[in-house]
Image: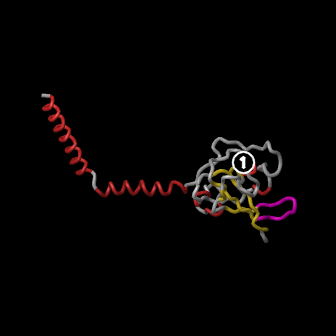
Amino acid sequence: MSEIKFTKLLEAFDRVAETAARRSAQTIGRRSALSAIGKLLVGGAILPVLPFDRSGSARADTAHGAGEADCEYWRYCALDGFLCSCCGGSISACPPGTEPSKVTWVGTCHNPQDGKDYLISYNDCCGKTTCGRCLCNGNVGERPGYRMGIHNDINWCMANTQSMYHCTVSVIVGVAEGK
């Protein structure tokens, strides 16, 4: 007798499943299903290149004094991120265990000591979680996000194998000529 109840239960389940499948086949077309899958794939592919705010709730750490660990240092005029000099690296070298980003943004900063303007390459150091120390947000010469080469709010680690942002270095690439 329990076998008969079990068989009837299975038959009822089959009927419900078949009815639901037929109803969904009549109301949901292949095109809408393919469209939904396409949206997920494209959205997933674009998500890593969207700009993001690195600051979180961190504050600038200026306890190191003037110089390489001070956001007011002239080379940091267009730097937006955590200073590698506070995170185990230096002003121009990434900390151990990280690698410089393959793409970068460039700014022009004025050195008050010699009165010259310098081209500065800001390289994100990639491969470790965010350092979280000495946050600086200099925006001299920054342009809108659609002008990527001169916009500093982008995760420049996106071109690296390890796309986690850790900190940023400031490398002089030349003297700016003429204004």
Q: Is residue 175 left or right of residue 168?
A: right
Q: Residue at x 61, y 55 (%)?
A: 155
**54 w.r.t. 2: above or below:** below
**6 w.r.t. 18: above or below:** above
Structure colour scheme = secondary structure
Q: Residue at x 80, y 61 (%)?
A: 110
Looking at the rendered structure, the kind of residue marked 1 is Cys
Q: Which residue is mark 1?
A: 87
Asked if residue 128 lies in the magenta stretch, the reply is no
Residue 116 in the image, given as x and y percentages of width and height: 83, 65
Q: Residue at x 71, y 44 (%)?
A: 133
**145 w.r.t. 21: above or below:** below
Q: Is residue 177 left or right of residue 156?
A: right
Asked if residue 114 lies in the magenta stretch, the reply is yes
Q: Is residue 173 left or right of residue 102?
A: right
The residue most toward the bottom is 178
**Where are the magenta residues, as a range?**
109-118
Residue 1 in the image, given as x and y percentages of width and height: 12, 28
Residue 37 in the image, given as x and y percentages of width and height: 38, 55
131 or 105: nearer the viewer = 131
Q: Within 10 Å of the Cα at label 1, are there few (<14), some (14-19), or many (20+) other Cα atoms?
A: many
Magenta: main secondary structure equals loop
The residue most toward the right is 113
The image quadrant that residue 143 belongs to is bottom right
12 or 54: nearer the viewer = 12
Where is the C terminus found, in terms of image quarters?
Answer: bottom right
Q: Residue at x 77, y 57 (%)?
A: 75
